[in-house]
Amino acid sequence: MRETLRELLGNPLVGHAFLIHHSERCIGYIVLSFDFSLEFGGKNAWIDEFFVQREFRSQGVGSKAIAFAVQTARECGAKVLHLEVNRGNRAIDLYRRFGFEDHDRYLLSKWLVGDGRENS
């Protein structure tokens, strides 16, 4: 994890990580990462990680963070901003309010390097 975070923080072409503060206290974070897609017209951004401490949820913090991510992705030249969310996550309503749409697709992943899973 440390090496991955070091790569992210050291290369703005890969993405950006932002801390969310309330007064002097860090209450969360949001991470944008980038890829390229012919289907989606070029550079894409992903909200790869997003977390707000429980006691600060439902107070507008998430909305401000998503608005910030949308603006930052635009400024970085992304054509589309994606995110994935687990089914049943209450935050899906927040994302839909910002215009995120469901796709009739599955996210499939194959690990290509060792993470403790078999790479067959």
Image (spheres, rainbow, N blue to C red):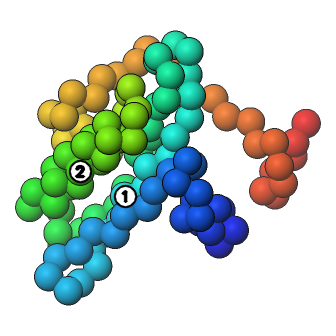
Name the residue that disc number 1 marks: 30
| Helix, strand or loop at mark 2 | helix
Q: Quadrant of the C terminus?
A: top right
Q: Nearer the viewer, residue 36 or 94?
A: 36
In which image quadrant can residue 100 be found? Answer: top left
Is 32 displayed left or right of 102 in the figure?
A: right
Q: Position of residue 20 (x, y in %)?
A: 27, 68
**Location of residue 53 with respect to 48 vertically, above or below:** below
User: Which residue type carries mark 1?
Assistant: Ile
Name the residue that disc number 2 marks: 68
Q: Position of residue 111 (x, y in %)?
A: 76, 42
In which image quadrant can residue 58 be found? Answer: bottom left
**Location of residue 30 with respect to 105 vertically, above or below:** below
In which image quadrant can residue 104 be found? Answer: top left
Say which residue appears at 55% left-offset and 22% top-offset.
Answer: 37
Q: Residues within 10 Å of mark 2 (few under 14, many from 20)?
A: some
User: Residue pushed farthest bottom?
Assistant: 24
Q: Nearer the viewer, residue 52 or 77?
A: 77
Q: Residues within 10 Å of mark 1 (few under 14, many from 20)?
A: many
**Location of residue 107 with respect to 104 vertically, above or below:** below
Label 1, label 2: how many angstroms apart (C-alpha)?
A: 10 Å
Q: Position of residue 59 (x, y in %)?
A: 8, 61
Q: Nearer the viewer, residue 48 or 58?
A: 48
Say which residue appears at 83% left-offset and 49% top-offset.
Answer: 113
| Helix, strand or loop at mark 1 | strand
